[in-house]
């Protein structure tokens, strides 16, 4: 395998998340690092008549942030029903609502204890919907203990890849020189968010995959800047 991308789990990810997966031979679902509060791991945005709004998977809080794979969903809160209701009322006029919403109801009928398992199962669903066949590996199964830039490098070396596709935030912590010494090139994603027909007036980029999925089936919009 020659090209890899790595990302933490995300609930209902944005389009750029899937572009990097599409452009990779293998994708690492990074669930063995520390959970980040107020990140996209357990929440994302949908569009409403009043603009964007967050929908959040509630978690059981602890004094210290555990690894993502250890984060437990607060099942005492009826979050799944609330999310489905929010999606229903804000997207019932969307182009593909009828065929899409039935699939969502089935997806949300499954129960999960851990947030990472929920995000992983949802990820497989979205990859199937977007016809992405990239190999997916969970980092918790790799037993690699390094951190930050070294963690990414060690994962790349583990799979003997020649290119790593990083998100833009990777520029803040990746040590490019270390990758060059190992013969691995680092390519930073430059995703141009495509415009498509949305509900509720002015176009808002960076919504959850739900927004794109409900409103259009023009998946070529995502892959038009394919890097490989």
Image (spheres, rainbow, N blue to C red):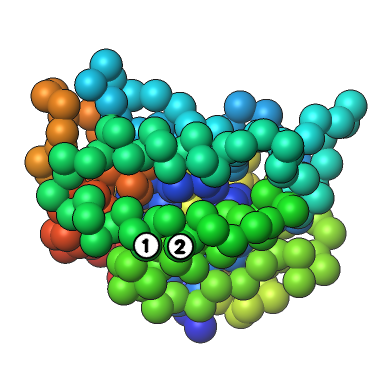
Asked if 169 appears above or below 28 in the picture, the reply is: above
**Whole-percent x, y for residue 13 in the image:** 44, 47
Name which residue lies at 22% across and 55% down: 98
Q: Position of residue 22 (x, y in %)?
A: 36, 67
Q: At x 63% / y 78%, what residue is drawn?
A: 159
Q: Position of residue 84 (x, y in %)?
A: 43, 42
Q: Residues within 10 Å of mark 2 (few under 14, many from 20)?
A: few
Asked if 51 appears above or below 59 in the picture, the reply is above
Q: Quadrant of the C terminus?
A: bottom left
Residue at label 2?
106
Which residue is nearer to you in this view: 34 or 226? 34
Looking at the rendering, which quadrant does residue 182 occupy?
bottom right
In the displayed structure, 146 sits above or below 132; it is above
Q: Element under label 2?
A: helix
How packed mark 1 is, by other alpha carbons closer than 10 Å (few <14, some 14-19, many 20 or more), is few
Query: Which residue reaches farthest top?
Result: 50
């Amino acid at each position: 395998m020659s090209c890899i991308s790595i990302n933490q789990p995300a609930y209902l990810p944005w389009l750029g998340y899937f572009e990097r997966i599409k452009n990779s031979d293998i994708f690492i679902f990074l669930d063995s690092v520390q959970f980040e509060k107020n990140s996209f791991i357990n929440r994302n945005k949908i569009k409403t008549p009043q603009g964007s709004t967050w929908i959040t998977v509630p978690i059981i809080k602890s004094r210290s942030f555990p690894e993502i794979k250890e984060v437990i969903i607060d099942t005492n809160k009826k979050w799944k029903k609330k999310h489905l209701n929010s999606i229903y009322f804000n997207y019932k006029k969307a182009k593909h609502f009828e065929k899409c919403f039935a699939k969502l109801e089935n997806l949300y009928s499954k129960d999960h204890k851990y947030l990472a398992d929920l995000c992983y199962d949802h990820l497989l669903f979205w990859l199937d919907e977007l016809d992405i066949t990239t190999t997916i590996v969970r980092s918790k199964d790799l037993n690699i203990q390094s951190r930050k830039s070294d963690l990414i490098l060690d994962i790349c070396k583990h799979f003997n890849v020649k290119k790593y596709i990083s998100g833009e935030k990777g520029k803040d912590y990746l040590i490019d020189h270390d990758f060059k010494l190992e013969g691995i090139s680092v390519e930073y994603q430059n995703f141009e968010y495509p415009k498509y027909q949305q509900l509720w007036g002015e176009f808002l980029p960076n919504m959850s995959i739900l927004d794109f999925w409900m409103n259009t089936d023009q998946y070529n919009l995502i892959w038009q800047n394919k890097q490989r």
